[in-house]
C-alpha cells in the first residue's frame, strides 16, 4: 500500500476528519472465524442442510443467525425455517462454538489499537456478537482500549449487517458521548466480511477491508471497500502513513 493509493482512495471518498475508528470484532480483533465457519458447517449438516460449505459461512458473516438459516432453508427446502427450528439450529451451533478453544487475538490487533489511541483517536467496537463474556475478554486481551459506553453488540441492534444499523448506532453513541455533531466523516470502519463492508458503506463511512479469511479480495472490494489490506498486521504497519494522509 502506497501513499498515492491511500490519497486516491481518500479523494474518491470525499473528506475524513477522523475522530474514531469503528472495529468489527470477529475476523478483525479475534481470529475467530475458523471456529464460526466450522461450527455453522457442522450444525447445518446435523440438520440435513447438506449444501452449506465452510466457505459459505464467510459469505454470511455478520448476518443474524435467523437470517442465515432462512436463506439456506429457502434454497434447500423452498421455505423459511420455523422459529422453533431457528432456535434449535442456532442453539446447536452455539453449543459447538462454546466447545471450541477460545479464539486468539488477531496478530497486530492490539498494537494497532494502541497506535490508534496514541494518535488521539477513539477506538470503538461494532459487532453482531452477543457473547456474554465479551467485555471480560476484551479487557484481558486489549486492556485500557475500549469504553463500554462506545460498544455496539448484538444487544443493541435488531437488523444486523448488511443493514447499516450497527454502524449508524456506533456513530450515534459516539456523537452522544462526545456531545459532537454526528457525521460519517468523523469515522473509519475496519471490516473483514463482505456484508460488514456493505453495512459500513451504506452508513456512509470510509471503509477499510482486512482480508483475514479465505474469500477473494474482490468479495470485499465489490461491496465498496475504500482500501484493502491483507492482514491486521499490515494495516497496523501502515497506520502512521494512513493517519498522516488522513490528517492532510
Ligand atoms: Mg467480522
Image (cartoon, rainbow, N blue to C red):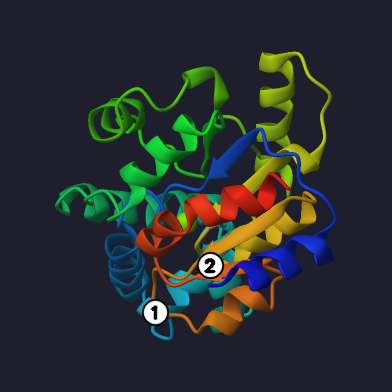
- At a point 31% along the width and 49% down the height, the residue shown is 94
Which of the two marks, 2 or 1, is nearer to us in this view? 1
Considering only vertical position in the picture, is 107 above or below 19? below
**Residue contact at pointers 2 and 1, CB within 8 angstroms:** no
Considering only vertical position in the picture, is 236 above or below 122? below
On the picture, is 81 further left or further right than 113? right
* Residue 146 location (% of width, % of height): 44, 26
Q: Mark 1 points at which residue?
A: 214
Q: Is residue 248 visible?
A: yes
* Residue 119 location (% of width, % of height): 52, 34
Q: Name the residue under label 2.
A: 60
Whole-angstrom CA distance, mark 2 to mark 1, is 13 Å
- At a point 65% along the width and 41% down the height, the residue shown is 166
* Residue 49 location (% of width, % of height): 41, 78
Q: How many marks?
A: 2
* In front of the other: 208 or 130: 208
* Residue 192 location (% of width, % of height): 50, 62
Amino acid at each position: 500500500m502506497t501513499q498515492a493509493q491511500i490519497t486516491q482512495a481518500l479523494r474518491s471518498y470525499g473528506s475524513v476528519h477522523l475522530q474514531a475508528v469503528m472495529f468489527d470484532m470477529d475476523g478483525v480483533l479475534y481470529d475467530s472465524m475458523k471456529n464460526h465457519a466450522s461450527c455453522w458447517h457442522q450444525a447445518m449438516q446435523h440438520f440435513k442442510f447438506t449444501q452449506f460449505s465452510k466457505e459459505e459461512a464467510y459469505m454470511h458473516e455478520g448476518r443474524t443467525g435467523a437470517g442465515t438459516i432462512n436463506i439456506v432453508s429457502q434454497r434447500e427446502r423452498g421455505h423459511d425455517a420455523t422459529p422453533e427450528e431457528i432456535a434449535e439450529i442456532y442453539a446447536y451451533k452455539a453449543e459447538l462454538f462454546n466447545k471450541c478453544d477460545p479464539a486468539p487475538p488477531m496478530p497486530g490487533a492490539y498494537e494497532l489499537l494502541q497506535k490508534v489511541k496514541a494518535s488521539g483517536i477513539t477506538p470503538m467496537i461494532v459487532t453482531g456478537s452477543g457473547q456474554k463474556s465479551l467485555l471480560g475478554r476484551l479487557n484481558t486481551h486489549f486492556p485500557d482500549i475500549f469504553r463500554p459506553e462506545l460498544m455496539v453488540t448484538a444487544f443493541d441492534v435488531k437488523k444486523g449487517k448488511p443493514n447499516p444499523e450497527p454502524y449508524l448506532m456506533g456513530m450515534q453513541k459516539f456523537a452522544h458521548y462526545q456531545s459532537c455533531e454526528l457525521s460519517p466523516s468523523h469515522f473509519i470502519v475496519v471490516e473483514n466480511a463482505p456484508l460488514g463492508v456493505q453495512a459500513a458503506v451504506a452508513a456512509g463511512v470510509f471503509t477499510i477491508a482486512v482480508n483475514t479469511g479465505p474469500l477473494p479480495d474482490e468479495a470485499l472490494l465489490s461491496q465498496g471497500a475504500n482500501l484493502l489490506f491483507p492482514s491486521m498486521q499490515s494495516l497496523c504497519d501502515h497506520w502512521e502513513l494512513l493517519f498522516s494522509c488522513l490528517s492532510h
